[in-house]
Image: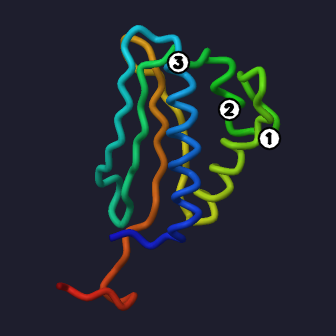
Amino acid sequence: MVRVDRIQIQQVLVNLIRNAIHAMAAAPVRTLSIATAPEREGWMQITVADTGSGIDTDVRARLFEAFATTKEDGMGLGLSICRTIVEAHGGRIWADGVAGGGTAFHFTVPLATLQEGDTDD
């Protein structure tokens, strides 16, 4: 269980998934993976990875800035909004290249605790 605003984190996931699908449009192999893993104590990491064309290192440095885009028809706000949402939850978001091509976006969210009213069902 994580402690998040479901609608906001859903928006982050939808944006990352849509970006991955767009990045893989011309790829010969199209694999999209979504995974969760424990991060540091009290935190969960979510990863959305694709087998698209990848992101140049210089572009990756400014990916999460407003109006930074690699799409012809993009406004460059999606990843900036994702960063704002994730950081509002106390987490962080970043991107890594994937061996063999593609990109993995990772973000962290806090785990819920029993003190917050969760039950041990």
Amino acid on which disc 2 is placed: Leu
Query: Up-down: is 81 above or below 105?
Result: below
For this rendering, which residue is in front, 9 or 87? 9
Q: Are marks 1 and 2 in contact (CB under 8 Å)?
A: no
Mark 1, Cα crowd under 10 Å, few <14 / some 14-19 / many 20+, is some
Could you tell me residue 29's position as x and y percent?
37, 13
Read off the residue under disc 3.
25
Q: Residue furthest front?
A: 25
- Please tell me in which quadrant of the rendered image residue 89 appears: bottom right
Residue that appears at 76% across and 42% down: 77
User: Would you say 49 lies left or right of 61 here?
Assistant: left
Question: Which mark, residue 63?
Answer: 2
Query: Up-down: is 76 above or below 53?
Result: below
Amino acid on which disc 3 is placed: Ala
C-alpha gap between disc 1 and disc 2: 8 Å
* Helix, strand or loop for disc 1: loop
Question: Which mark, residue 24?
Answer: none
Mark 3, Cα crowd under 10 Å, few <14 / some 14-19 / many 20+, is few
Read off the residue under disc 1.
66
Could you tell me residue 105's position as x and y percent?
49, 37
Residue that appears at 36% across and 66% down: 42
Amino acid on which disc 1 is placed: Ala
C-alpha gap between disc 3 and disc 2: 20 Å
* Helix, strand or loop for disc 3: loop
Could you tell me residue 31's position as x and y percent?
35, 24
User: Would you say 57 lies left or right of 50 here?
Assistant: right
Residue that appears at 82% across and 35% down: 67
